[in-house]
Image (cartoon, helix red, strand yellow):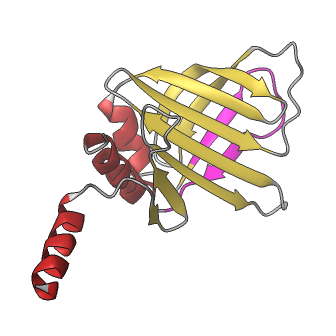
Amino acid sequence: MKRTLLAATLLAGLSAPALAQTKVGDWEIEKRTQDEHCNASRSYKDTDADQNVIVLTYSKDAIVIVLIYEGWEWDKDDKIVNADFSTDQAKIMKKAKWEVMDKTTVRGTFEFNQSILDMLGKAKRISLDFEDDDDDDTEFETPRLGEALAALKFCEENKK
C-alpha cells in the first residue's frame, strides 16, 4: 500500500509543470504570481564592479527587455531615449526606443519578432549605443542566453 501511494505521488509530481523556478547557468527562469508571463533574468557585476541586471520576457505580441546598469544616471526629464540595439553578432535595431524607468533602468518593448529572439539567442553580449551620448556604448554579458531562451519558451508554453 505504501509503495503504491509513493508511486502515485511521484507520478503526479512528474506530470505537473515545473514553473516555480529554473536556473540555466546564472539565468533565473521563473513565472512569478504577480506576472502574466515568465521571465528570464541575470544579475552580475561587471569589470568596473557595477551591478548589471537583464530581464527578458515575451508573449505572442511583444518582447520586453529591462536593463539595469549602476553606471547610468538618467534624469527625470529622460522619458524616452534612442539607442542602437545590437549583439556581438548582429545589429538588431537602429534607434530603438527605450523607456527610462528610473536613474539606472531602461525598458525596451518591441513588437514580437522571432528573428530578434534568434539573434539574442546567439549573442554573448548585447549593447546599447545611445544617440545623444558620446561615451562608449553599454554592454551586457549574456552567456548561455540561447539556453535561457529555450527554458523561457518552455516556461511560457507550460504556464498555468
Nearest to the observer: residue 97 or residue 29: 29
Percent across and percent down for residue 130 are 72, 27
Asked if residue 101 is positioned above or below residue 3 in the image, the reply reads above
Horizontal side of residue 71 vs 128, given as left or right: right
Asked if residue 131 is positioned above or below residue 85 in the image, the reply reads above
At 37% from the left edge and 53% from the top edge, which residue is drawn?
Answer: 19
**Where are the magenta residues, as a range?**
126-143
Residue 138 within the magenta-colored segment of the rendering: yes
Percent across and percent down for residue 151 are 35, 54
Horizontal side of residue 157 vs 89, given as left or right: left
Asked if residue 66 is positioned above or below residue 8 in the image, the reply reads above
Residue 30 within the magenta-colored segment of the rendering: no
Q: How many marks?
A: 0
Quarter of the image that includes the N terminus: bottom left
Horizontal side of residue 109 vs 16, given as left or right: right
At 19% from the left edge and 80% from the top edge, which residue is drawn?
Answer: 6
At 27% from the left edge and 55% from the top edge, which residue is drawn?
Answer: 17
Quarter of the image that includes the C terminus: top left
Percent across and percent down for residue 9 are 20, 71
